[in-house]
Amino acid sequence: MLDQLAGDVVYSPYGLNRALSVIREGATGETRRALERFQRPPEVPGVLSAQAAWLAPEYAAGPKLTLPAGPLEIAAINAWSDEQTRGMIPRILDALHPDEIAVVTDAEYFDGRWAQPFEETRPAPFEGVGEVPMMTVEGRFEHGDGAVRLPYAEHDLRFVAVLGEWREVEFTRGQGTVELPRFTTVSSLELDRLLGLPSEPGHDLDELIAGPGKKALGRVLQRARVDVDEAGTKAAATTAVSMRTVSMPLNPFHIAFDRPFTWAIEHAPTGTQLFAGRVVNPTSRRD
């Protein structure tokens, strides 16, 4: 997917697969078939992961949704993201759409120290940008054609850098010098159209979400951040997959105020009328 995302970007394929695998495991029909490529990845030591579901008042977890659940409220969802990512992703949602009735969230957090920290940082040119803080380290590393693997101190994790676009490289181990810029990248991605997932309401998600109306996948959002410096790397991502509904009431009503009517503005708890009036000849404001 990286080749479809332009410019400076960071995203978590691990978090995306974990989030969509929750939907895949509970979906049926066309939605299940479209999500077959999103298999749940194995747990990786050194990465702190968390998942949760968030439900609108008229909806409940179906038999295939076993995540911890909370109310579908922006403040609660964003607070969860902030806590699970140690403050790196303080917000995942800016708004909820009126038809969204559930959200599944996945959070990933990584804090890794280099097995061999960088020794020196100095200004150096970076193509197309000018001078940037360039870190330098000498040691024995796996390297290839314009590529290097830098190990972290724990959990058999490593940072892999490749000049140009991502490609397969044959690595050998040897003594050398690596220069890498200190950098931070932050991304906010809307991935549902890029992934081409089905969005037609139906009954494919009924075992995940119990409640009225036909349901469909909604938005797939991910916000991610990475900080790389002399000591190591911090990275985090929160993924949110929403589900929406199209409800048809059993006895739909239609009222057209197309003849004279009366109206009032009232205090709902007490019925106290604050303003009242009658409309016989509707006119628009002229000021």
Image (cartoon, grey):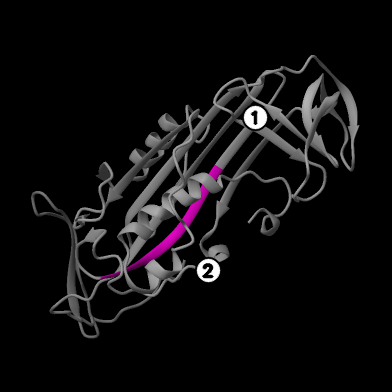
The region drawn magenta spans 214-223
Does the residue at mark 1 contact the one at mark 2 (Cβ under 8 Å)?
A: no
The outermost residue toward the bottom is 259
Badge 2 density bin: few <14, some 14–19, many ≥20, Cα 10 Å: few
Left/right of residue 252 with respect to residue 126 in the rendered view: left
Residue 191 visible in image: yes
Amino acid type, residue under disc 2 in the picture: Gly
Residue wearing tag 1: 227
What is the crowding at mark 1: few (fewer than 14 residues within 10 Å), some, or many (at least 20)?
A: some
- Find residue 260 and report its image quarter: bottom left
- Locate residue 146, reporting x and y percent: 85, 40
Quadrant containing the N terminus is: bottom right
Left or right placement of residue 154 versus residue 90 in this view: right
Magenta-colored stretch includes residue 215? yes
Q: Is residue 33 above or below residue 230?
A: below
- Image height of 233 relative to 245, above or below: above
User: Which residue: 59% across, 37% down?
Assistant: 225
SS label for mark 1: strand
Q: Residue furthest top?
A: 119
The residue closer to the viewer here, 204 or 157, is 157
> Where residue 129 appears, x then y in whole percent?
87, 39
- Look at the picture and state if 76 lies above or below 6: above
Residue 112 part of the magenta segment = no
Query: Of helix, strand and loop, which one carries label 2?
Result: loop
Q: Nearer the viewer, residue 255 or 31?
A: 31
Q: Is residue 94 visible?
A: no
Q: Position of residue 229 (x, y in %)?
A: 70, 23
From the image, tell me which residue sits under label 2: 196
Q: Amino acid at mark 1?
A: Asp
Is 90 displayed left or right of 158 in the figure? left
Residue appearing at x 25%, y 72% in the figure: 247
Q: Residue 174: percent from the left, percent from the top?
A: 83, 26
